Amino acid sequence: MTQTALALTELKSLLNEVCDLNNANAVLGWDQSTYMPSGGGATRGRQMATLEKIAHEKLTAPRTGELLENLKSYEQELPYDHDDAALLRLARRYYEQATKVPSEFLAAFSEHSSNTYLAWVKARPANDFKSVQPLLKKTLDMSRQLAEYYGYDEHIADPLINLADYGMKASTIRALFAELRSELVPLVKTITEQPLADDSCLLQHYPEAQQFAFSTPIIKRFGYDFERGRQDKTAHPFMTKFANGDVRITTRVKEHDFSEAFFSTTHETGHALYEQGINPAFDGTFLDNGTSSGVHESQSRTWENLVSRSRAFWSYYYPSLQQQFPAQLNQVSLDTFYRAINKVQRSLIRTDADEVTYNLHVMIRFELELQMLEGKLAVKDLPEAWNAAYQNDLGITPPNDSNGCMQDVHWYGGRIGGVFQSYTIGNILSAQFFESALKAYPDINNEIAQGQFSTLHHWLKTNIYQYGSKFTANKMIERATGRGLDIAPYMQYLRTKYGELYTL
């Protein structure tokens, strides 16, 4: 073997070990959120911190840097879209990021996040913000320190945003949100001035087992492979991946709200379809993940909203749902049900929000994050600031902190900064990708109305999924749609769908 081949083999072996450690850590995180007994909490935090520290030390070892330096000329000789070139680009980026942060700090942050999550699980149902306030204060301090380690030119949030959505900054997102907000606010106002849709049909008793009996065959038909995945229950739904052959989803069930579990399930399935669709040759490498949080979120929103909340989808599946729940739905028309699942209202909970108001929830969180990181908002004042923002933007005030600043797990299970913008980026991209899929295959909506999803899945796998992290998000968007991030398809989608629903 040549020296280049030997160096590449050694580097790949080293990076495989880093991935194995990270994936083992993900197993511990999945268990913590599903089946772990509460007594294991403190120890679990330490275990996860240990694995993160070892993975970080292995990635930042001097030998990793030497190998990357030795392979520079090889990388430059390769075509941009060569798998090795992509792996070396990504490895260099991760190495340069990681070497800026001490492993002891990352381990401490990991353990703190685990302990904070366990405290949040207890505090939220008890409406006890004060018990988690000091933990959240420490999270903010550590998030600021993390940003300082990475360094930044403009805004302290920039390096944290960059971790999730590479190449984006606070200024970029603020401009994007301002453009979107100018379009959304008038639409929300026009719709919410009309009588609310009747969603009482969704708020009857839907036994858990029957809900799963209905949803499981559907996500299989979407393309979710249960031979390489499973579904479990949790407090806050998520998707996690341990290998190309082990991609798991979770959901949250409410027996008196059909929409909770069904749309959580289709949302997480969208994430899982992305991960299951990545080229199997990337298994165990840095390429074996979605390219950014925003692109990832586009897939969950595609399958949750553009597919599962569409009239085409329910024109096929509503008779089956009525058969599963005859007492609840036999007297409810398709039109009534369709309006119910697409009800637009000024609401408190982000994860329950409709498509039209959802992004306002994200914008509130994004601005609060920036204010906390800038030092303009203290953690002790977060509940008041949260309530004021909701009153100002959505015209409602949370009755308690459980449905206010404690409702999302993100700040209580990770960092503050760069964790919410991806949801809105994903919403925008979902429509942009779907538009391109329709241009390639104009019959996709007709196929959805027949319970067929293979053409849509094929287009997404061909243009997005298979590449994993081989290309940056910006490059991926351009390759798949022929242009950069654009809100026009998303606003057209909302105006068309909700224009018909509300006769605008």
Image (cartoon, rainbow, N blue to C red):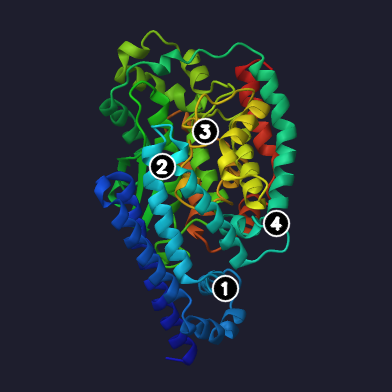
Residue at 63%, 42% in the rendered image: 368
- Callout 2: helix, strand or loop? helix
**What residue is shown with label 3?**
305
In the image, taking residue 13 as reference, residue 350 lies left or right, namely right
Residue 164 coordinates in the image, percent (x, y): 56, 55
Tell me the number on the disc at residue 120. 2
User: From the viewer's perspective, is the residue at label 3 or at label 4 nearer?
Assistant: 4
User: For the residue carrying disc 4, how many other residues have a C-alpha within 10 Å: few (<14), some (14-19), or many (20+)?
Assistant: some
- Callout 3: helix, strand or loop? helix
Residue at 55%, 25% in the rendered image: 347
Residue 121 coordinates in the image, percent (x, y): 37, 40
Mark 2 or mark 4, which is nearer the start of the sequence?
2
Tell me which amino acid carries mark 2.
Trp
> Do the numbered discs 3 and 4 sit on residues whose CB atoms are within 8 Å?
no
**What residue is shown with label 4?**
155
Disc 4 from disc 2: Cα separation: 29 Å
Mark 4 or mark 1, which is nearer the start of the sequence?
1
Mark 1 or mark 2, which is nearer the start of the sequence?
1
Tell me which amino acid carries mark 3.
Asn
- Callout 1: helix, strand or loop? helix
442 over 107 or under it: above or below = above
Q: Quadrant of residue 82?
A: bottom right
Q: Quadrant of the C terminus?
A: top right
Mark 3 or mark 2, which is nearer the start of the sequence?
2
Disc 3 from disc 4: Cα separation: 33 Å
**What residue is shown with label 1?**
96
Tell me which amino acid carries mark 4.
His
Mark 3 or mark 1, which is nearer the start of the sequence?
1
User: For the residue carrying disc 3, how many other residues have a C-alpha within 10 Å: few (<14), some (14-19), or many (20+)?
Assistant: many
Tell me which amino acid carries mark 1.
Glu
